[in-house]
Image (cartoon, rainbow, N blue to C red):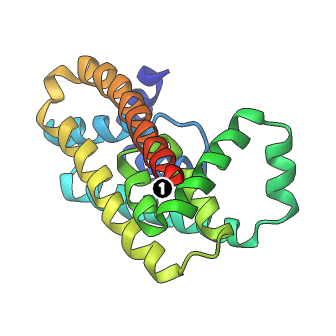
Amino acid sequence: MIDFFFGLVATWGLVIIAASAYFSCLAVPVPTFAVMLSGGAFAAAGDLVLWQVLTVAYVTALAGDQTGFQLGRLGGKWLDKFLATRPNRAALFARAQQVVDRWGSTGVFFSTWAAAPLGPWVNFAAGAARLNPWRFIIWDALGEAIWVVGYVMLGYYFAANLDALTTLVADWAWLLTAISLAIAASFFLLRSKQ
């Protein structure tokens, strides 16, 4: 599947990077890390322009996060109906609500890059929790900068080893998410004992 997305980036370039960054922030299962890595690799090869890859990925990721935040603010029946038939996603949303309740905008910051698979759900949860929109925007923008620059520049500098890097980053992302959630759970447990 990742090779399929590499091919799409090779053919459609910035359009695929934009669509991937936007829709992944709305919990659409797209391997955006691979798209970002390939965007950086194509920039290193001279097929794409690096600043354009970075800008398009960053702006559309922010737009996706803002859309998710606003959908969360609207909340209501559509979200309940969607989650009722998808227990795994309902569990992710419940975890995201815990992150927002406990950490607020700091949780938004870390969910964009350190716990990226949880990020879209944090966007929805932050909106549903009525987190201050300006705090959301600021912390989201800082986190997305780390996420976009990190993945695109990894692809740029390690373009020759992109297949191995993609596998490593996919495994690393889930490991980092698991570690982040374990640390958050530890804090919750320690806090509840006090």
Residue 128 appears in which quarter of the rendering?
Answer: bottom right
Q: In this view of the protein, which residue sits in the foreground, 2 or 126?
A: 126
User: In the rendered image, which residue does mark 1 sit on?
Assistant: 194
Q: In this view of the protein, which residue sits in the foreground, 173 or 55?
A: 173
Q: Residue furthest left?
A: 157
Query: Is residue 139 placed above or below 124 in the rendered structure?
Result: below
In the image, taking residue 167 as reference, residue 60 lies left or right, namely right
- What is the x, y in percent for residue 54? 27, 56
Q: In this view of the protein, which residue sits in the foreground, 15 or 55?
A: 55
Element type where label 1 sits in the image: loop
Residue 182 appears in which quarter of the rendering?
Answer: top left
Visible residue check, residue 51:
yes
- What is the x, y in percent for residue 131? 57, 75
In the image, taking residue 81 as reference, residue 10 lies left or right, namely left
Visible residue check, residue 46:
no
Amino acid identity at mark 1 = Gln
- What is the x, y in percent for residue 57? 37, 55
Residue at the (64%, 76%) spot, across then down:
130
Residue at the (85%, 43%) spot, across then down:
84
Q: In this view of the protein, which residue sits in the foreground, 153 or 73?
A: 73
In the image, taking residue 91 as reference, residue 38 lies left or right, namely left
Query: Is residue 51 placed above or below 10 in the rendered structure?
Result: below
Q: Residue furthest front?
A: 194
Residue at the (35%, 45%) spot, across then down:
114
Residue at the (24%, 52%) spot, across then down:
149
- What is the x, y in percent for residue 39? 29, 41
Query: Is residue 18 placed above or below 63 in the rendered structure?
Result: above
Label 1 Cα neighbours within 10 Å, binned few <14 / some 14-19 / many ≥20: few
